[in-house]
Image: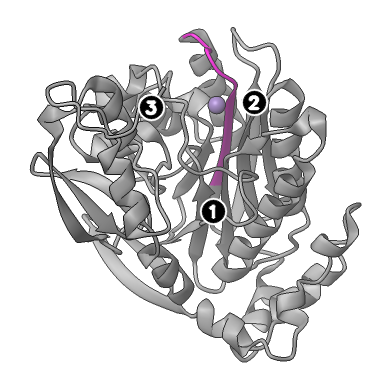
C-alpha cells in the first residue's frame, strides 16, 4: 500500500491574505492555519510547514510529535520580532507507515484530520477550540457551533508558549481509505454530508481537493480554505524498505534523530539542530517519558488506536481549573482539554452554582483557564461575578 496525495488552498471571499499553508511530501501531509496579524499568521504557518517538510521517509508518532514541538519552539522564538508578535498557527499532520499499515495523525488547534472509509466520513482529531469545549459540555448543538461567533477561538496553537501539548492518533488503514486534512475554512462552510458526497464522487485526489475548496469558497468563503487528501492505494511504497529497516532497530536508540540531524539546520541555528535532549547520553528518561501506551477503541467498523504517553499523563494531571458539574461550580485537577482518557478529578467543591453567575462569568468559566495551584483556581472562582450576591471583597475597577 502507498499514499497518493494532493492539496488545494484558496484565500476565500473575505480575507485579504491566505494564512493557510499545506504540504504533501511523500507519505506525509499537513495543513497549518496561521493567526495573529497579517504577517505573523502567514509566517507562523509557513514555519510549521517548513519544519514538517524536513521529514524524510516514515517517522513514528514520537518523532512526528517532536517535529511539531520543534516547530512550536521555532515559532515562539520568532514571535519576539515586532512584526511577528503574537503569531501562532494550528497544525494537523499525517504520515503513513507502510510496514504497519498505520496512518498517524497529530494535531494542535482546530484544523482537522478525517478518515473517509466506505462512504463514511469520521473526524479523527479533536478540535482544541472554545466551541468544541462548549459542545462537549452540551451547551451548543453542532449547528450552533458551526455559526458560533467565537468559533475561531482555539484553546491550543503552535507558537503561544515554549511548550505545546500535541495529540496523536493512529489509524489502521486499508486500500481505498482516504485521509482528509482541512482548515476550518472548509468545515465551517461545508457540512460533513457535503464533504462526504464530494469524496464519494471524485476518486482522483487532485479533483477532490479542488472541488472541496471550490464549494467552500462558493458557500461563502469567509475564511481561507485548505484541504489535503492522502489516498491509500494498492502498490509498493518506495520508502517502505527504509521504514522496515528503521522499525527493526531496537527501541530506545534514537534512530529518528539520525535522519533529522542533516535536515534541521535552520537559520536560527542551535534550536533546530540535533535535539540536545536526544544527543545527551543520559537519554533514557526521554524514552521513558514517551513510551507509548496503546489503547484500542472500536467505533463500528472503524478501529482507531489512540496513543498515550507517560509524559502526557503527568502533564495531563498537572494544573487546576474550574468547571461545571451538575450545575455546581467545582475545581478539578488536570487539564480541561487534555488527552481523552485522562479524566480530570474533582479536587474541591465550591458554594457557587452556574445559575448564580452572570453571562460574562459563565463565559470565563467555559474557557476553563488552567491554574498552577488549587489556591489560584479558588481565587478565580471567588472573582467570578454573581449579580445576585456580589461578594467579591476587593474592588475590581
Ligand atoms: Mn481558518
Q: Quadrant of residue 346?
A: bottom left
Q: Earlier in the sequence, mark 3 or mark 2?
A: 2
Q: Which residue is farthest left? A: 326
User: For the point 49% across and 80% down, which residue is it?
Assistant: 291
Question: Under tag 1, what secondary structure?
Answer: strand
Give coordinates of residue 201: x percent, y percent: 43, 28
Tell me what residue is drawn at x 25 percent, y 56 percent.
332
Q: Quadrant of the C terminus?
A: top left
Label 2 residue SS: strand
Which mark is drawn over residue 233?
1
> Foreground mark, 3 or 1?
3
Residue receiving disc 3? 396
Q: Nearer the viewer, mark 1 or mark 2?
A: 2
**Above-or-below relation of 242 to 267:** below
Residue drawn at the location 24% of the way across and 45% of the way down: 323
Q: Per the image, is 102 magenta? A: no
Q: Position of residue 277 (x, y in %)?
A: 71, 77
Q: Nearer the viewer, residue 165 or 20?
A: 165
Place of residue 361 in the rendered image (x, y in percent of width and height, measured from the top left) = 28, 28
Q: Is residue 53 left or right of residue 283?
A: right
Can the viewer see residue 100?
yes
Residue 246 placement (x, y as % from top left): 67, 80
Residue corresponding to mark 2 = 9
The stretch in magenta equals 220-230
Q: Visible in this render: residue 118? A: no
In terms of secondary structure, where does tag 3 sit?
loop
**x 48%, y 73%: residue:** 311
Q: CA distance from mark 3 to mark 2?
A: 46 Å
Amino acid at each position: 500500500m502507498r499514499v497518493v496525495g494532493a492539496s488545494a488552498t484558496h484565500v476565500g471571499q473575505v480575507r485579504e491574505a491566505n494564512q493557510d499553508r499545506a504540504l504533501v511530501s511523500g507519505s506525509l501531509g499537513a495543513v497549518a492555519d496561521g493567526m495573529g496579524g497579517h504577517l505573523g499568521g502567514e509566517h507562523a504557518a509557513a514555519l510549521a510547514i517548513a519544519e514538517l517538510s524536513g521529514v524524510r521517509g516514515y517517522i513514528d508518532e514520537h518523532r512526528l510529535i517532536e517535529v511539531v514541538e520543534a516547530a512550536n519552539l521555532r515559532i515562539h522564538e520568532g514571535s519576539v520580532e515586532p512584526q511577528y508578535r503574537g503569531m501562532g498557527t494550528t497544525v494537523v499532520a499525517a504520515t503513513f507507515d507502510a510496514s504497519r499499515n498505520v496512518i498517524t495523525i497529530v494535531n494542535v488547534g482546530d484544523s482537522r484530520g478525517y478518515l473517509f472509509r466506505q462512504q463514511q466520513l469520521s473526524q479523527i482529531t479533536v478540535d482544541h477550540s472554545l466551541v468544541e469545549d462548549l459542545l462537549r459540555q452540551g451547551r451548543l448543538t453542532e449547528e450552533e457551533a458551526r455559526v458560533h461567533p467565537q468559533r475561531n477561538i482555539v484553546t491550543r496553537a503552535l507558537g503561544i508558549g515554549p511548550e505545546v501539548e500535541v495529540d496523536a492518533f493512529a489509524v489502521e488503514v486499508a486500500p481505498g481509505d482516504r485521509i482528509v486534512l482541512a482548515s476550518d475554512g472548509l468545515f465551517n462552510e461545508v457540512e460533513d454530508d457535503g464533504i462526504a458526497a464530494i469524496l464519494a464522487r471524485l476518486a482522483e485526489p487532485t479533483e477532490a481537493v479542488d472541488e472541496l475548496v471550490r464549494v467552500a469558497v462558493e458557500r461563502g468563503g469567509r475564511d481561507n480554505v485548505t484541504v489535503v487528501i492522502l489516498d491509500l492505494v494498492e502498490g509498493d511504497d518506495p520508502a517502505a524498505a527504509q521504514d522496515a529497516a528503521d522499525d527493526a532497530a531496537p527501541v530506545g536508540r534514537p534512530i529518528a534523530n539520525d535522519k533529522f540531524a542533516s535536515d534541521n539546520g535552520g537559520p536560527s541555528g542551535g534550536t533546530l539542530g540535533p535535539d540536545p535532549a536526544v544527543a545527551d547520553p543520559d537519554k533514557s528518561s526521554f524514552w521513558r517519558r514517551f513510551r507509548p501506551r496503546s489503547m484500542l477503541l472500536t467505533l463500528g467498523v472503524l478501529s482507531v488506536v489512540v496513543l498515550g504517553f507517560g509524559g502526557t499523563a503527568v502533564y495531563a494531571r498537572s494544573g487546576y481549573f474550574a468547571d461545571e458539574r451538575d450545575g455546581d461550580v467545582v475545581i478539578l485537577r488536570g487539564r480541561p482539554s487534555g488527552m481523552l482518557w485522562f479524566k480530570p478529578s474533582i479536587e474541591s467543591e465550591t458554594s457557587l452554582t452556574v445559575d448564580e453567575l452572570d453571562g460574562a462569568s459563565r463565559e470565563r468559566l467555559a474557557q476553563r483557564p488552567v491554574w498552577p495551584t488549587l489556591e489560584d483556581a479558588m481565587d478565580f472562582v471567588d472573582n467570578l461575578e454573581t449579580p445576585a450576591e456580589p461578594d467579591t471583597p476587593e474592588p475590581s475597577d
